[in-house]
Amino acid sequence: MKAWVLRGQAPIQRHPLTLARLPRPEPRRGEVRIKVLACGVCRTDLHIVEGDIPMRRRPTVCGHQAVGVIDALGSGVRRRLGERVGVPWLHAVCGTCADCRAGRENLCAKARFTGWDVDGGFAEWMTALQESAYPLPSLYADAEAAPLLCAGVIGYRALRLAGAADRPGGLRRRGELDSRQGRGSFILGLYGFGASAHLTLQVARGLDCSAYVFSRSPAHRRLARALGAAWAGSAEDRPPKALDGGIIFAPAGGLVPKALGHLRAGGTLALAGITMSPIPAMDYGLIYGERRLVSVANSTRQDIREFLALAARRRLRVETESFPFEAAPEALRRLKEGKVRGAAVLVRTGPPAI
Ligand SMILES: [Zn+2]
Ligand SMILES: [Zn+2]
């Protein structure tokens, strides 16, 4: 099969990925094999490729928003051949540490991740643990379903950490929107408007939030307004009202003091990326007033199930820019340059090379 292989990290312009022929993987006990039909391209993939975070195995096949069909079963697996599934970032956790036992498996120090610790979806086939292969809502075509798996799920977790969900009008359990009337006054700031933010904005609108979007890109601001943003500007602009909560998606630490400057006392700013450039020194006054700054680390399996349930109940408009599988480096380059509208997705084209 064909797979994009990372042997050594380097800026994407220096072509660190090579299209290689690898043996088609065989599912081991407890695993399914998936014929990959589409795989989302996440900022984290770019961080792994370029060396912003370390490699965990060599070589690596990236990609952790894979959509495909189960085409082989390992022993002990009870799944249906031909079932469409999605494989997200979280591969496995230890299940026994204090964090796992307390429902914080996203913080498990022994957690392993798709496309980082195990081969991911930038390939024609992949294997996954059967519990990491999630059924997907049929409302979404393959390329639309892919960005739900990380961009969507992380945004959903970030929304909750930013305080937008757990309030009247927010969420009930298991991804259900609360039918109680919300106060409608929660103002949420979104910094950077790519794959995750464009989905998070729509979920936030469903939670009766007003969304203010901060982006350097006029095209991204236009998309934000089209998707229901109440206001869109750049991070240097002063929004019309103070934010009740905010989420920074862009990997730019320089945004932190700017966003804190927009946040009301008692508000929370969530940082949704796996890494970001250094946060500059800042005045204590920016965080005084019991403002909170919190990172978002991975997601739990419960987050994934809840978000997919929510996306099944409420059709999200998923803006995708599709690239042929063979154009993975081009997709990553456009993502780096901030040129992707919505989410970049690799789609399988033509007959597979077995
Ligand atoms: Zn991701
Ligand atoms: Zn653990």
Image (cartoon, helix red, strand yellow):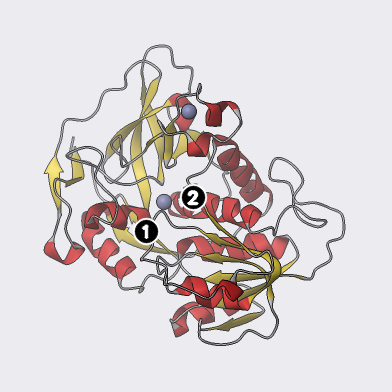
Question: Looking at the picture, which amino acid does disc 2 mark?
Answer: Ala
> What mark, if any, has residue 145 been given in the picture?
2
Helix, strand or loop at label 1? It is helix
> What mark, if any, has residue 195 been given in the picture?
none
Q: Is residue 80 above or below residue 234?
A: above
Q: Label 1 vs label 2: CA separation? A: 17 Å
Residue at the spot of label 1:
43
**Is tag 1's residue or tag 2's residue first in the polypeptide sequence?**
1
**9 or 333: nearer the eye?**
9
Looking at the image, is mark 1 or mark 2 nearer the viewer?
1
Q: Quadrant of residue 241?
A: bottom right
Q: Is residue 15 above or below residue 112?
A: below
Residue appearing at x 35%, y 74% in the figure: 339
Helix, strand or loop at label 2? It is helix
Does 193 sit left or right of 117 as displayed?
A: right
Counting from the top left corner in percent of width and height, residue 161 is at 62, 54
Q: Is mark 1 within 8 Å of ligand 1?
A: yes
**264 or 156: nearer the eye?**
264
